[in-house]
Amino acid sequence: MTHCPIRVRFAPSPTGYLHVGGLRTALYNYLFAKKHGGTFILRIEDTDRDRFVDGALESLVKSLEGMNIVPDEGVFLLDDPHTPARVASRHSETYPGVSEVGSYGPYIQSERLPIYAQYAEQLIASGHAYRCFCSRERLDLLRESEMAAHKASKYDKLCLKLSEDEVANRIAAGEPSVVRLNVPEDRGDIVFHDLVRGDVTIHAGNVDDQILVKTDGYPTYHLASVVDDHLMEVTHVIRGEEWLPSTPKHVLLYEAFGWDTPVFSHLPLLLNPDKSKLSKRQGDVAVEDYLAKGYLPEALINFVALLGWNPGQGSTKEIYTLAELALAFDFAQVNKAGAVFDARKLDWLNAQYIKALPIVELVEKASPFLREKEFFTSAQDNRKTDEYVTRVTEIARERLTTLAEIGDEQRFLFVEPVVDSALLPWKGNSADTTTEALVRAKDILADIPDIDWTRQRLGEILLAEAGEKRGDFLWPLRVALSGAKQSPPPQDIAWVIGKDATLLRIRTSIRLISE
Ligand code: GLU
């Protein structure tokens, strides 16, 4: 057996957004290619004109590249900052701003129509496909009678009986027709090997005479993808389980053309926690929605990688970079059973990634979310500087699940808190004790030179002053600075808002409690 280089493809039909299931398919293709030094191709399957959405192709390519799943070959956007500099081997004729790299193009199916037409003719000529003129009404009646007889819904091959002349005359008369696959009636079992499922057997008797070319002349997915996978020398077809029932039709097509079949891998379904199929109704399914909510691409990739694959061998490692995934990934560790989409796990992973990000990067990623919040826009100018935002981010990061949450629980860092005087005393302490603690805190803080106004020094000084009785001293100070029952420790707040604001807030609370 010759050892041919691995070539895989992600072949989405652009619908307007990148589904998390699509991301997982793209990722596994990408990882498999990287692991084996192969080529990862991005092909666009846009032959279903009824489902055409303007801008969908572009947004899909953009999302994929934004997730760092960059194809080696196929479609890319010329003006996307994520795209590595590339020399286009071809520009799309129909999508402005979309180009291609690689010598197997076009990689956009709507730009390959003459190729499919030629292969459809070849199938008709060899008897593996035939023209069908049946009307929608006849097909509906057929389906109803099959259902009534509890039979599987299949076309009854009526048009297979038409003579060549009859077919030619009806076409010449302008009658609409489709091209159907001629599933041999005596074919028996169709067996193919799947890297996830092992040998899969389906009886040809259960396979319908699939439409290969529609009345509008466009190929269906089945014909187009088989022709392209062959012409693009795809060695492994890695796709979601929902395509498993289509695979026998594809195997018949490969046989009809006399081509070798690629190796198939059907990835497990993604399920909601109640084990129903993952759907938009129960939560977000678009990658774009997760990014808009402040999930990091790296966390999303890590999460999606673990939906159906595990590192095996008792490994408990959960945090993986893309490069680590490419090393570890193996189809032997991909499950057959559906993978439950556990949003809490994604939250946990995202929080880990947020904690681990260098502060400069975290600020860069989180500040766009912060800068559009009302409490931010209405804050004093000195609380809008990069330096101030960096300090806020530093103390907020420990509690963040998503970037979008930044500042939500620390509004008092931007606007003056409204303090409830009843909240100031620590556990049954009197107003006098509370005032005494606040005055002491004010005096100590007032004496701290600017050079010592750091998060660490402030912590050391305040904790030393609090001694054994932390609550008595630190609680009123924390409430005076935040107005909240729960907040970061007072030294963190004091450090962020600075000395003047700190002293002002303490004085306000002293006044409040003595009223
Ligand atoms: N165009 C199909 C889709 O939208 C591709 C299926 C396949 O990978 O063969 O998912």
Image (cartoon, grey):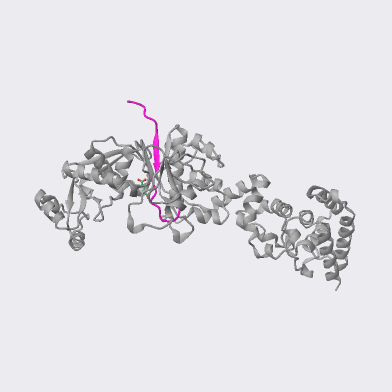
Residue at left offset 23%, top offset 48%: 207
Residue at left offset 24%, top offset 42%: 252
Q: Residue furthest bottom?
A: 515
Direction from residue 339 to residue 441 in the image, left or right = right
> In x, y percent, where is residue 22?
43, 49
Q: Is-magenta flag for residue 11?
A: yes
Q: Is-magenta flag for residue 43?
A: no
Q: Could you say which is closer to the camera, residue 387 or residue 183? A: 387
Direction from residue 32 to residue 514 in the image, left or right = right
380 above or below 462?
below
> In x, y percent, where is residue 171?
16, 54
Q: Residue furthest top?
A: 1
224 above or below 294?
above
> In x, y percent, where is residue 145?
17, 61
405 above or below 101?
below
Q: Could you say which is closer to the camera, residue 350 or residue 56? A: 56
Q: Which residues are magenta?
A: 1-18
Direction from residue 322 to residue 75 in the image, left or right = left
